[in-house]
Amino acid sequence: MKPSDADSGGQGTPDSGIPGYRGPRACAWPPRPQRTDLRLIAEEELRTWIVFEDEDLLVIDKPGDIPCHPSKAGPASSLVGAARLHTGLETVHPIFRLDRETSGLVLIAKNQALARRLQKATERRAIPKSYLAILTGELGGDMTVDQPLGDDLHSPVFTKAAVVPGGRASITHFRPIARAGGYTLARVVTETGRKHQIRVHAAWLGHALVGDKIYGPDARLYLEFIATGWTPALESQLLLRRQALHCETIDLRPAGIDQLFKTPLPPDMAGFCRKNGLE
């Protein structure tokens, strides 16, 4: 089934009147701003996020305002950079990437041998993961979305993906845990690992994630955020400062490693659930 226009996100078009926009996908637009509010990760703070560590593997419960990959602001501005400082290693190997605004479990291998092993297991889909998501609207029951994904060629947001004919095969399973007040707390499992997959498929269903600046009520809210930062006007429409998505579990047992990692909802998502009766 295809909800009517659920994947459009209200995005701008080539004649959307957005200053500086010269047409779809001509360049990476909007340009990345020179951020002055980058959060630097202190060693003692990183230690509080560690779920597991041994001589080969580091597992971190990433907050929803930390990028995974290094930036020009130095190693302490990203999770991978801070992990390098913490371990004293010149190179560490993240196995999974989470978007800056997605919280939850991240695997980091400390050596190439384990990295290769886990990456091959990932390719075989032998490392199952589950996510918790807060969706707008009350999802009536279990839903599986089997819809191909590709670039959204009509959006002024260069990074935006969409359900497109001929795109890459993508399958996402949504299972409601609680429904109340016009929202759903759902457990989400993916069979594939495409860019923004859960967010795009949730929007396609007509149940975009709470707080999603790109796939929520209007993709131009992301452009507004880039220009102005977080404002009361954005909060009134998005409700949460970031998309309500959290990587809850990673199971290494199918990959031959006797470890199952799990982390609870972070405070911002848990608080939203309490406020709206999603217990």
Image (cartoon, rainbow, N blue to C red):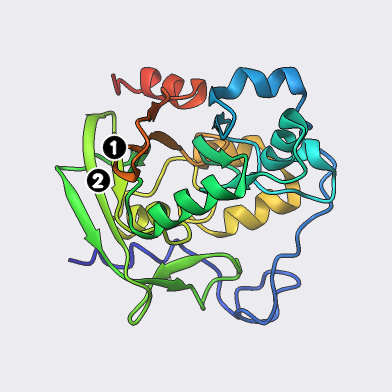
- Residue 40 vertical position relative to residue 154 in the rendered view, above or below: above
Callouts 2 and 1 close, C-beta under 8 Å: yes
Q: Secondary structure at mark 1?
A: strand
Q: Secondary structure at mark 2?
A: strand
Q: Position of residue 139 (x, y in %)?
A: 21, 42
Check disc 2 and report the residue beneath it. Answer: 174
Q: Name which residue lies at 56% across and 69% down.
A: 12
Q: Position of residue 125 (x, y in %)?
A: 33, 55
Q: Quadrant of residue 68 in the image? A: top right
Q: Position of residue 253 (x, y in %)?
A: 31, 37
Furthest toward the front, the residue is: 113
Left or right: residue 159 compared with residue 183: right
Quadrant in which the N terminus appears: bottom left
- Residue 250 vertical position relative to residue 72 in the rendered view, above or below: above
Closer to us: 196 or 260 = 260
Left or right: residue 213 compared with residue 166: right
